[in-house]
Image (cartoon, helix red, strand yellow):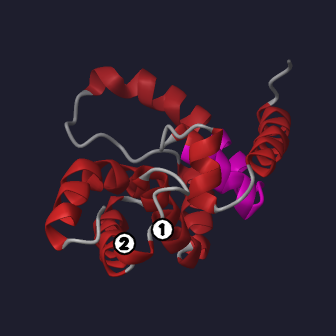
Amino acid sequence: MITAPDAFEAVFDAHYEEIRRYLGRRVGLDVAEDLAAETFLIAFDQREAFDPSFGEIRPWLYGIATNLIGRHRRTEVRRYRALARTGPPPDDDGLHDRLIDRLAAEVTVGRLAKALTKLSAGERDVVLLVAYGGLDYAGVAAALRVAEGTVASRLSRARTKLRAALGVEV
């Protein structure tokens, strides 16, 4: 049980970095640290309400983090639109031998970022929880508190939309 503060420390140690990385991919590193801290503050405050019979702690934390992202959704969409226009940020190391890779990445990341802006919020959450969080359908369902069938249908619709936007034929 995680109701004891000492037990929650182990949860924090085991999952903080993973949640911070997920948030960084979704909203940028500049916001991720704050949202990760807020995720664990909320989890700590609500630790007595966590029901282990509902699922594991990891999807619960992803659910809290995703809900916080919902509050920052406009910023997220603006970020993807900017990424679609400008591509990924240049490397800080100044090595010119990465120019070709970076140019290819700009095209790919830009197209993908633009395609992500066309998804509904629910579809985007499912895609990014699978891609960034590495969650399976059950984990995504637990994180978003929806049925696994809803996860499957959202992911299916998102894949169809992404394939069309990226010109990928199946």
- The vertical placement of 99 against 41, above or below, is above
Q: Residue at x 52, y 62 (%)?
A: 63
Residue behind mark 2? 43
Q: Do we see residue 128 in this rendering?
A: no
Disc sitting over residue 115 in the figure = none
Query: In front: 87, or 74?
Result: 74
Residue interval drawn in magenta: 111-129
Q: Could you tell whether 6 is left or right of 126 in the image?
A: left
Quadrant position of residue 12 = bottom left
Query: In front: 164, or 63?
Result: 63
Residue found at the far left of this picture: 6
Q: Is residue 124 within the magenta segment?
A: yes
Q: CA distance from mark 1 to mark 2?
A: 7 Å
Q: Earlier in the sequence, mark 1 or mark 2?
A: 2
Residue behind mark 1? 64
Assess whether mark 2 and mark 1 are in contact (beta carbons under 8 angstroms): yes
Decide: few, some or many residues near mark 2? Use Cα within 10 Å; few <14, some 14-19, many ≥20.
Answer: many
Q: Could you tell whether 130 is left or right of 14 in the image?
A: right
Quarter holding the N terminus is bottom left
